[in-house]
Structure formats: C-alpha cells, structure tokens
Image (cartoon, helix red, strand yellow):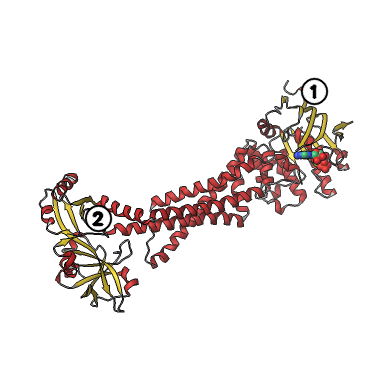
Amino acid sequence: MPDLALKTLVHDKLRFFITVSGVAFAVTLGFVQVGLFMGLMDNATVTIRKMDADIWVTSRNTPNIDFAHAFPESYVQRVRAVPGVADADNLIVWFMNMNLPSGAQEGVEVYALEDFSKWNIPWNVSEGNLDDLRRGNFVFLDDSGIRRFGPFQLGEYREILGRKLRIIGRTQEAESFTTTPMVFMDYELAQALNPDELQNRTTYMVVRLLPGADMDAVKAEIAHLLPYNDIYTRDAWAAQSKRYWVESTGLGLNMYLTVFLGCLVGIVVVAQTLYSSTMEHLREFGTVKAIGGSNADIYSILIKQASIAAVVGFILGAAMAYAMRPAIASINLKLIITPELAVAVFIGSIVMCLASALVSFRKVASIDPALVFRG
Amino acid sequence: MKERNNGAVLDAREIRKRFTEGKQTVDVLHGVDLSLHRGEIVALEGPSGSGKTTLLSILGCILTPTSGDITIEGDLVDIARPASLPAVRKRSIGFVFQQFNLFPALTALENVEYALNIKGIKGREATEEATRVLDDVGLGERASFLPRDLSGGQKQRVAIARALAGRSPILLADEPTANLDSQMGRQILDLFRDLAVKEDRALLIVTHDPKVRAICDRVIEIQDGRLAA
Ligand SMILES: Nc1ncnc2c1ncn2[C@@H]1O[C@H](COP(=O)(O)OP(=O)(O)OP(=O)(O)O)[C@@H](O)[C@H]1O
Ligand SMILES: [Mg+2]
C-alpha cells in the first residue's frame, strides 16, 4: 500500500530536514536541560546515596547536606545504645578555605569521619589509602577540584585554615551541588582546624541498622533521645536536600521554563513547516478528496507525517544530546539521561508534533475539492 | 431494477447553480437536464465561462447544485448533505483533470494504487488492479516512474488509469487533452474511449477541442447555462 504520508514527507528533503531539525532542537534542549538538572540533583545527594548509612541525624532544620550546623558530638553515645542500631558515627561536613600556591583562596567542602572505609566514603578512590588519613595532617582531594585549584600531586601540601596539609590521596566524583570540590580528612583534624565552631561538636550522625531492625522504631527512639535533632531515612534526607535546591534557587522553575521554551520553539518550527507543507500540497489534498477521500483520510496523513517527524527528530535530538555529553563533562557538568527521561521526552515530542499537526487540520478541512479543476 | 431512467447510470434533472460572492450572485446553470448511459461517450462543449466545469463538478458530486436532482446508479444523491458526497465519488465516479493532479511523491503504480486504497480496495488486489489498468493505458513499463519523470501524455495516461481503476461506472474528464499536443491528445482520446467502451463505462468529456467531438457518440452544448441540442 503506497504510503502517501511518508513519501510526500520525504519527497521534499529540505523541508523534511527543517521539520526534523525543529523537533530535534526541542528534544536536545529537553534532554540537556533536564539531564543537567538531574546531574546537579545527583551531585546534591551523591554523598547521601553513597554513604552506607540508613539513618541521618541532623541538627534541627538543616535545609540540606551542604548547609550543616553543629551539635554536641556526645549524642552519638545515646544513639549507639538504641536497640537495632549496628553502628553510629559522627560526620562533619563543613566549608573551609584552602590557600592555593598562587596565593588565591578557594572554598572546599570538607567531609570528616573517624573511619572512612566503614561508611564507604569516598566511594571512588584512585590513589592513596583511606586508613592513612587517621595518622595526621593529611587530606584526600577530588579531581573535580583540578579546574579550580589546578593540578595536584600526591605528596604536595595545601594550606587549609592556616594549617599545611599533605595530599595523600585522590578521589573521583566527589563534587557537591555547588560544584565545590570535596576534601576528605580525619574527624579530629577538622575539629582542630575550626575549634571555635567544631570543638566537641559534629554536624551529622550517620547510623547503620542491624539486619531486620525496624526502621520506624529506631527512628522514633532516636527522636525520643534527641529531641532537638531531626532524624531522616536516607531517601527522605536525599529528597529534602534536593527539594531545598529546587525550591530555594528557582532551579526547578528555570528548568521547566527552558524546557517549555524549547517545546514552544519546537512547536512553532514544526507547526510552521507542516502548515506550509500543507499549503503547498493543497492540490494533492484536494485530489484525495475528489477521488472520495474524507477529511479523516487527510487528517491521518497529517498525523502520520507529524509522528514520523517526531520519531526521526527524537532519534536525532537524542543522538545530539548524547554526543554533547563529553563536552558537558569537560566543563565539569553531568548530564544524566535516565530511561524515564527518554520516555518522557519521546512522549513529549510526539505530543508536540501532533499539536503542530492540529494547526493544519482546519486548513485541510476547508479544502474545496473543486480546486482540482482549476489551473 | 436498480438503474431507473432508461438504464441511465447518471441522471441529472433541473440542475441550477448560483454562485454567491458577497453581494454579487452569478447564475451559471439555469436548469440542466442530462443523462449518461453505460458504454456511452458524450462530449460537453461550450464557450469559456459557460459553466462546463461547474456542471461536471456537480455531476461528479464535488459541488452541490443550488437545486435539482441527481441520480447515480439508481440512487438519488442527497445534495442537502454534503458529507454524503465523498462516498458517492468513491463508489461511482472516476475523474480525469486537465492538470493531471497526480501525487508527485508516488510512482505511476502507487498513484493508481493509492486511489484504489481510498476506494477501499487494498493490498494485493489493489496492486493487481493498478498493474492491470496501467498495462491497459500502455504504461506497464513505466509503473515505477515518478510523475516528474513522465511526459505530459504519460502523466495523463496515469490519470486515466487512476480513473479507470476500481471500475467506477462514470468517468468524468475536464479538458483532458488541453495540456497535450494535438497528436498526443488524439492518442489519449482514442485510448480513453476504447477502454471506456470495452469496460462499459459512461464517459463525459468536457472540451473545447474539435477532435473530441469526432470520437463521441453524442455532443451536448451548453450556452447561457442551458443545454442546446
Ligand atoms: N467558485 C466559484 N465562485 C464564483 N463563481 C464561480 C465559481 N466557479 C465558477 N464560477 C463562475 O461560473 C462561471 C462558469 O465557470 P466554469 O468554470 O464552469 O466555466 P467553463 O465553462 O468551465 O469555462 P472554461 O472553458 O474557461 O473552463 C464563470 O463565470 C465563473 O466565473
Ligand atoms: Mg472549465
């Protein structure tokens, strides 16, 4: 059966290309915007998800993992005594300044624990031994810092809050939402660097449950023991950290707006090319009607053309977004494309193209088949 | 008996057509009576602007008359309900236009097949029927050509094949030879007539062309919106 819709669509190659490009543009924009957003959200919660902890204890009203306040470190004793708790440790997350060899200062986000290996933090170590951190004025730096601090070698020194610290390890992927690189050091060292605020104090407690322990019961018991702290499950804490950034920064709104604008541009381009294509093929549509075709026959042609443009445009746009990933990675941003996102963008492009086709429906409905007799 | 009116496959009575353009009205047809029988070739002549195309469009159920009755294959066409007309065209009418009106993106064969698909004939059956009529018009060899690769005469043969396909009993042609040179026009007319007669169709050809008159059983003239004998 001859496919009038497909053949007519690809017959005019330039127009087909423009139509598909319009879809591809919107698709790429959707992928990149949402993907970057998801990448940032991923950073915002990466340590929460990687840390081998089931429960997080924070000081009251801590908005997200990066904005910690301190509370007495001795609370950990009470938590360790709660039935069902396998392990509980203090964790300090604190912004500090690092002096660069150039004389400049840059912020780093310090993660400090007594035993890093126990909590699977940092999770991607390329050089160095985590257990050595306990032995003195040492740090692990993350490679994401290279862009800000310049390259570093193990054995070099960096000064943090006035104290010279030796770099004894290198990590990957440890980058916070604010793109501040993470630095890992011993718990007591972090307290010593900032005694005014951290002496005998911690910013979080991470808790691991015994197998089969009742999460709700443990949470309730900790809450009872520590009435001035907030208690979260891992997922709830990650969600809270994300929500903070989405809502307080307008980042979510910004993303939706860009995606919306991308779709708008896509719809305009696709609707415009489909409509002008319809106008150019009026005589053919008139002929379809003259030989007995109904409006529905012509609608189905338009719908099919729009769907083909959507599918081809989606493939092209997805390929472009994929191709952009190395470039995006090179500027230290992460583009996360999940299957759910791909499905959503695909449905979006179909809807966008069908909406564009609707613009032409009225036109073809009004075609007078008598035009086939005119010159 | 299905076909009334002495076996006429198409019967038009008292056809009037008035065009209204803003405040202006033009009365183009003032009561035309006309019938067509199977196997009959009729030429419709008349000066430019006399209403030939208008009448053909009405007979072909593309345009509705302002008043009058049209009976096609024994059924009265419901001119008050334009939505019913495509079905009549689908079932009973094959058109050939001066401008060919082929689908440029489809090959000769596909052009014919597509028309068959619209008429509800699909798949293998459509391909076989399309191949048959293309062979009949002498274009079997060119079945896979796009219209742009065909000459004017070849295009019109495809258009004729398209009208013949599906065995619509009524064939209506509006100046089918006007865009062709005179020798090609003659060939096409002969072919058209032969096929129409062979397959027992009724063929009405609107024309200015005196050659057409020669191949027809009957010539009707339209003047001032009426048929002159
Ligand atoms: N849609 C329309 N609206 C208004 N007037 C129309 C319309 N179609 C045709 N007419 C008028 O009806 C008259 C007959 O037109 P028609 O096209 O039927 O003539 P014709 O005999 O086919 O002429 P030609 O030989 O030049 O093709 C003309 O005066 C034309 O202006
Ligand atoms: Mg005319």
Q: Is residue B99 left or right of residue A99?
A: right
In the rendered structure, the residue with mark 2 lies on which chain?
Answer: A
Q: Is residue B141 left or right of residue A176?
A: right
* Nearer to us in this view, A341 or A304: A341
Query: The C terminus of chain B appears in which quarter of the rendering?
Result: top right
Q: Is residue B92 above or below residue A300?
A: above
* Nearer to us in this view, B120 or A258: A258
Q: Position of residue A250 (x, y in %)?
A: 38, 55
- Is the CB–ligand 1 distance for label 1 below 8 Å? no
Q: Secondary structure at mark 1?
A: helix
In the rendered structure, the residue with mark 1 lies on which chain?
Answer: B
For ligand 2, give the image quadrant.
Answer: top right
Q: Is residue A157 left or right of residue A10?
A: left
Choose top left, top right, bottom left or bottom right for residue A122: bottom left
* Nearer to us in this view, B37 or A148: A148
* Nearer to us in this view, A61 or A34: A61
Q: Which numbered tag is attached to residue A62?
A: 2
Residue bearing the label numbered 1:
B6
